[in-house]
Each structure stands twice: as C-alpha cells, then as structure tokens.
Amino acid sequence: MKAMPAYGLPPLRLQALLTAGGPVAGTGAEPSASELDSMGKAVLRLQRGLTGERALAGASYMDDPELLAAYLLYYWPVSYAQATRALELAGLRPASILDLGSGPGPMAAAALDRGAARAMLVDKSAGALALAERILAPASVSSTCLELDALAQGDGPPLRENAALDGEERFELVCFGHSLNEFHAGENGRIGLRAALVERAALRLAEGGSVLIIDPATLAAARDALALRDALCARGWRVIAPCTTDAPCPALAAGASHSCHDEAAWAVPRIVEALASRAGLDRALIKMSWFALRPPEPRSYPSAVADSLAAKREHGPFPASDQKTLYRVVSEPMLNKAGRVRRLICGIGGRFPLSAKRGDQNAEAAGFFALRRYDLIELDKPERREGGWGIAADTRIRVAQSPEPGLL
C-alpha cells in the first residue's frame, strides 16, 4: 500500500482565507513576523476560551476582529481538514448541505470541495457569514448556490427557534461543526436539549439524508458527544460512521476518565504551523469527536429500538471468535509490562484489546503492527484470550477502510 498525501487545504482556499481575514485584509498577503506574534497570542486566547476554561463557548467570539482573524488562519483550516476526513470515512458526498452554526464555513467548504452544489449556512454572526461568502465563492464550482441565514444573529432568536430549521427545502446533509458543544454548554440536561435540536434539524433532511456532528476531542466534549450519540441511537437513529454498531458506547460505561476520539496526521499549512509554534500548541494531528448518523424511518418505534440495543449489549463481552465482523481501531498501540502490544478495537461485543507479543511473526504477517487509529478492520479467526483477542497463526486481518485519504 503506497503512502498517500495527508489531509490538507487547497491553495485557493488558503488564499481566500488570507484575503478575507489576514492582517492586511483584501490583499492576500501573508502576515509578517510581528503580525504572526500578535496573532499567536489571539490563537492561544481562542484555544483557552474554546477548549480550556471554555469561557468563549457559546459567546460571540466571531465578532471580535482579533479572534476572528485567529480563527480564520488557524482553526478554519483545522476544521476543514476534520470535515474532509469525516466525510470521507462516512462515505458521504452530499449534493446539498445545511450548515448550522457555520461560522465562516469550513464544514460547507469541505462539502463543496467534494462535489456539493448547494450550501445554506446559518450562524448568529452576520460578520462570520459575510466572510463565509467571500471565502467560499472564489474556489467553488460555478454552479454552487450559497444562501446565508443570519436570523439568529444579535438579539434575535437562538438557533433552536431559528426559522431556518422550519423551511421546506430538503438537504442531503445537515451538519454541526463544533457548534453543538456550545449549545447549552455546562447546563444540566444539555444532552437532551442537543438531541432535540438534532431531531428538529433532521426534519430538513431529504430522504436518505444524514447528519454529521463534529465536536472537540477534549474529555468533556468527547463524552458529551458520545452521550448525544447514545441518546439518538436510543431514539432509533443509526450510526453510519465511525461506529460499527448502534449499541451504547462502551467508553462511557468504562468510567469518567474514558472517551473516544479520532486523530490523524495532516498536511499542516505553513500559516497554521507558524501560529501553533507561537502559541505553544501542537498541530501535527487533527483530533475530533464525530459521528455521521441517519434518523429513524417514520414508521420505526424508538422504544423498541432502544430495547433491541440494550439486548445487544447484554450479548457481550465478545462475539464468537469464528464470527467475521467489522471493528474500528480506537486507540494508539500500547505496550504492557508483559511485552504485548495492545490496541483497543470497538464493535459488536463492546470495546476490548487486540494484542500480540512485540515482534510476533504471526502478528507481523497479519498486518497487526501496521494498523492505524480508526482503521476499519475485519477479523478472521482471532485467538481468544482473557479479556480480549490475540493473533494466532491462522488469524487474518483485512483493512476494510483506511482513514488515510486516497485509500477509500
């Protein structure tokens, strides 16, 4: 399998970002060293406000010129790469997208660059929407139709009361890119409120349409995302990716210190690398918690589905070792005291380790040591071990889907 390029940002998109929000807006010029120093401080302020103490979560930071510039040249490329990866792993190429809490449009841009012809962006910041129009137009196909909806801006109605959720037009994809985690952040009952918002937004889906949710990979945000996933599945929703089952997430049940998130290497744009260095941040990897889901059919019965999912969970801890099924690799390799390399896999039966002795020839031949986080694998004849599976002489591992671009 030859190496493929990592996730990156098309040059036209980067140029549009520099033109729209660079220190010398309108020129497309790259920032000077002193400008990068100043923007690096804004990036750190934004990072702390969104994923640290979260003082900016839900706030109108898009209306702060310094923070908006930092977002455009740092977080926008990151969010674009995350959306591209999630869309690829989920196998989604929507022709139309409704982007809720869009900001300046990185999620919509990723969909447009995968062939979408129509995008409707909804955000409470009119300034962010104006920038989205400037950023998306130059590098979008000529047939692209953009519609911007700022009904929820300023002192207007919040997103849950936005008329954009009640329109008649249908979309193949409704997405929430780093916006749901800011909805009722820190409040009791937030998971139920978010689930209700997703279900209402799903009314705008075309037949067979999907919802894509991307949130931060921090412990708190990831566990909230997992809880939201479980709440929707209990109401009859089906997970397209990355999960291979709709059963309750085993990471939540494992304890308050456990979560599950995706991470991958990417082609870090030079401007992002420079800002990360000045802010003392590491951007070698993109990390996120995400799910692509489909709502239940109109005639399905959520309570019955919930009972079915609960029954599935009781069938654990593992399926029969001669049963071929798909699992998602959900951890980096871990070396235990016995010298075994362990990776957590997740699927039917829950989340449990697949392991092999370091340097084991059977594991080497099966491709175990080459596995990457979020590889989707099919296992044939794994060795049954206490608390998990091992690699025997006749064990076979087939990578059904690799998260590296170009291999899908």
Image: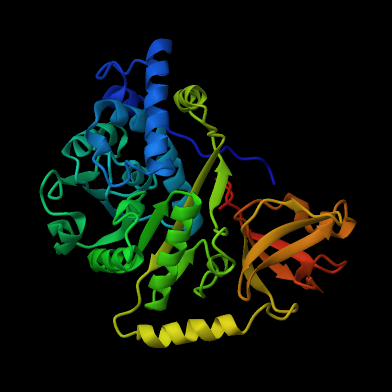
Question: Relative to 249, is 34 above or below?
Answer: above
Look at 49% across and 81% down and name the residue there: 309
Question: Relative to 321, is 393 above or below?
Answer: above
Q: Nearer the viewer, residue 303 or 46?
A: 46
Q: How many marks?
A: 0
Question: Relative to 194, is 21 above or below?
Answer: above
- Residue 301: image x %, image y %? 35, 86
Quadrant of the rendered image containing residue 175: bottom left
- Residue 59: image x %, image y %? 26, 43
Q: Is residue 27 at least partly visible in the picture?
A: yes
State left or right for residue 399 relative to residue 92. right
Look at 82% across and 59% down and name the residue there: 356
Quadrant of the rendered image containing residue 319: bottom right
Question: Relative to 64, is 114 above or below?
Answer: below
Quadrant of the rendered image containing residue 353: bottom right
Q: Is residue 75 at least partly visible in the picture?
A: no
- Residue 377: image x %, image y %? 65, 62
Colour style of the rendered protein structure: rainbow
State left or right for residue 339 relative to residue 290. right
- Residue 127: image x %, image y %? 19, 35
Look at 29% across and 25% down and name the residue there: 66
